[in-house]
Image (tube, grey):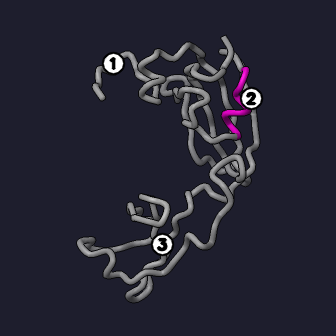
Amino acid sequence: MQIAKHKVAVIAYTLTDENGNILDQTNDHHPFAFIHGTGNIIPGLEKALEGKRSGDSITVSIAPVDGYGERDEALSQVVPIDMFSGVDKVEAGMQFHAQTNHGLSVVTVTEVKDDNVTIDGNHPLAGITLNFDVKVIDVRDASAEEVDHGHVHGPDDDHHH
């Protein structure tokens, strides 16, 4: 069976940046499963996996435009530290949910200086070329319930929506 829209693809992958640093990794024992064609993975990887079968392996380099987008410096801004009331110590690397003009978004603290905090609303992998080494472990039809819910249900899944 080939990977196509509304098929569940089970993959093992290693994701590296341009310098070969591992950014994320799964394996055969703890693979990643997703419903293809529903926007659950970045567009470039979804396109590269289209038509692949169980046992296939691919290596693909994905430009930012087909990954998490280019960095947008307008999404980085300095805000007063008192916007973080209730947080004992605001530090670089912390992430917070923030209400923006585009709805709820995750922002990352990039710098704390005096009473000012620099936050960045870009995805941490924005602007980075992503290199995937992928092995397709399994491909199957998604159940009607999985398609309806928009995600894969595992064998022990008895959750209710």
Q: CA distance from mark 3 to mark 2?
A: 36 Å
Give the quarter of the image for residue 69: bottom right
Residue density around tag 2, few if under 14, some if 14–19, many if 20 or more, within 10 Å: few
Position of 71 with respect to 18 (left or right) is left
User: What type is the residue that disc 3 sits on?
Assistant: Ile
Position of 34 with respect to 15 (left or right) is left
Disc 1, SS: loop
User: Magenta part of the protein: which range?
Assistant: 44-51
In this view of the protein, which residue sits in the foreground, 52 or 12? 52
Q: Residue furthest front?
A: 101
Secondary structure, magenta segment, majority class: helix
Residue density around tag 1, few if under 14, some if 14–19, many if 20 or more, within 10 Å: few
Q: CA distance from mark 3 to mark 1?
A: 39 Å
- Where residue 38 appears, as percent x and y from the top left, is 57, 32
3 and 2 marks in contact (CB < 8 Å):
no
Q: Earlier in the sequence, mark 3 or mark 1?
A: 3
Give the quarter of the image for residue 11: top right
Q: Earlier in the sequence, mark 3 or mark 2?
A: 2
In this view of the protein, which residue sits in the foreground, 85 or 89? 85
Q: Which mark is residue 70?
A: none
Kindly identify which residue carries mark 2.
Answer: 58
Disc 3, SS: strand
Kindly identify which residue carries mark 1.
Answer: 156
**Image quadrant for the N terminus?**
top right
Q: Residue furthest left?
A: 86
